[in-house]
Image (tube, rainbow, N blue to C red):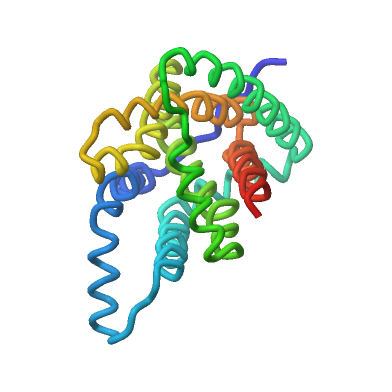
Amino acid sequence: MAKRRPLTGMTQSERLLGGVLLLLYLVVLPLTADRAFGLVEQLMGWELGENVRNAAYYYVLFALTVLVFGSFLARATRDFLSRIWSVLGSACLGLVAFFGLGELSARVLGLVLTEQANLNDAAISAKVGAAPYSTAVIVVLLAPFVEETLFRGYLFGNIREFSRPAAYAASSLLFALLHVWQFAAVNHSWTYLLQMLQYLVPGLVMAWTYERSGTLWGSVLLHAAVNGLAVAALL
């Protein structure tokens, strides 16, 4: 059976505002969020705490994503509901590919990287102990929804209209960069960027799942399942 092409169909405003939101999420917010929360705390006169900050950060991103991509998400949802079993099947295949190719890539990367600690998993592990339930909601529900909408629905889907290889390359590389560049900046060591290699396979598999399922919810379900298994192992 031929693979279905992703149903992008974004309006002009979704394309424009989506680019702004992607830039905010990838670069601007990681650099300015702490200052913004600090200002809010000064205005309110009390400290929010790291767990509240994390939750507020992703709830705001979730709301912005729905506002910006409302019509696209509605179409994706209708398409998902019209062939739910096919989409679930694509997500399951993606899950098998994720762990199979992940194991293979880990062995290959072992020849290149002396340290393969997953920076994202380490950060999640630290937060799970302090706030397990709110962290689970963020990691399993909110983050996959926001990231898949931006990196697969927006970036991959729109570039895919012009070049399939470029869509895979751009969405996977920026997805990988998202997970490591802050560590490199904070620690003033660009060697952290080598850890990007760990995230290339996940990015490629999620893009493939989105393309095969033909709806954003295929990759969202895969991303949520992967993160859910990771959180369950830490609880």
- Name which residue lies at 67% across and 16% down: 2
Locate the C terminus by quadrant.
bottom right
Would you identify the image quadrant in which residue 39 lies? bottom left
In the rendered view, tell whether residue 38 sits above or below residue 226. below
- Name which residue lies at 49% across and 17% down: 110
Disc count in the image? 0
Would you identify the image quadrant in which residue 86 lies? top right
In the rendered view, tell whether residue 89 sits above or below residue 144. above
- Name which residue lies at 53% across and 51% down: 125
Which x, y percent locates residue 139? 55, 52
- Report the side of 36 relative to 109 (left or right): left
Which x, y percent locates residue 119? 43, 40
Outermost right residue: 85
Outermost front residue: 114
Locate the N terminus by quadrant.
top right
Which x, y percent locates residue 198? 47, 27
Which x, y percent locates residue 42? 23, 81
- Name which residue lies at 28% across and 28% down: 191
- Report the side of 42 relative to 117 (left or right): left
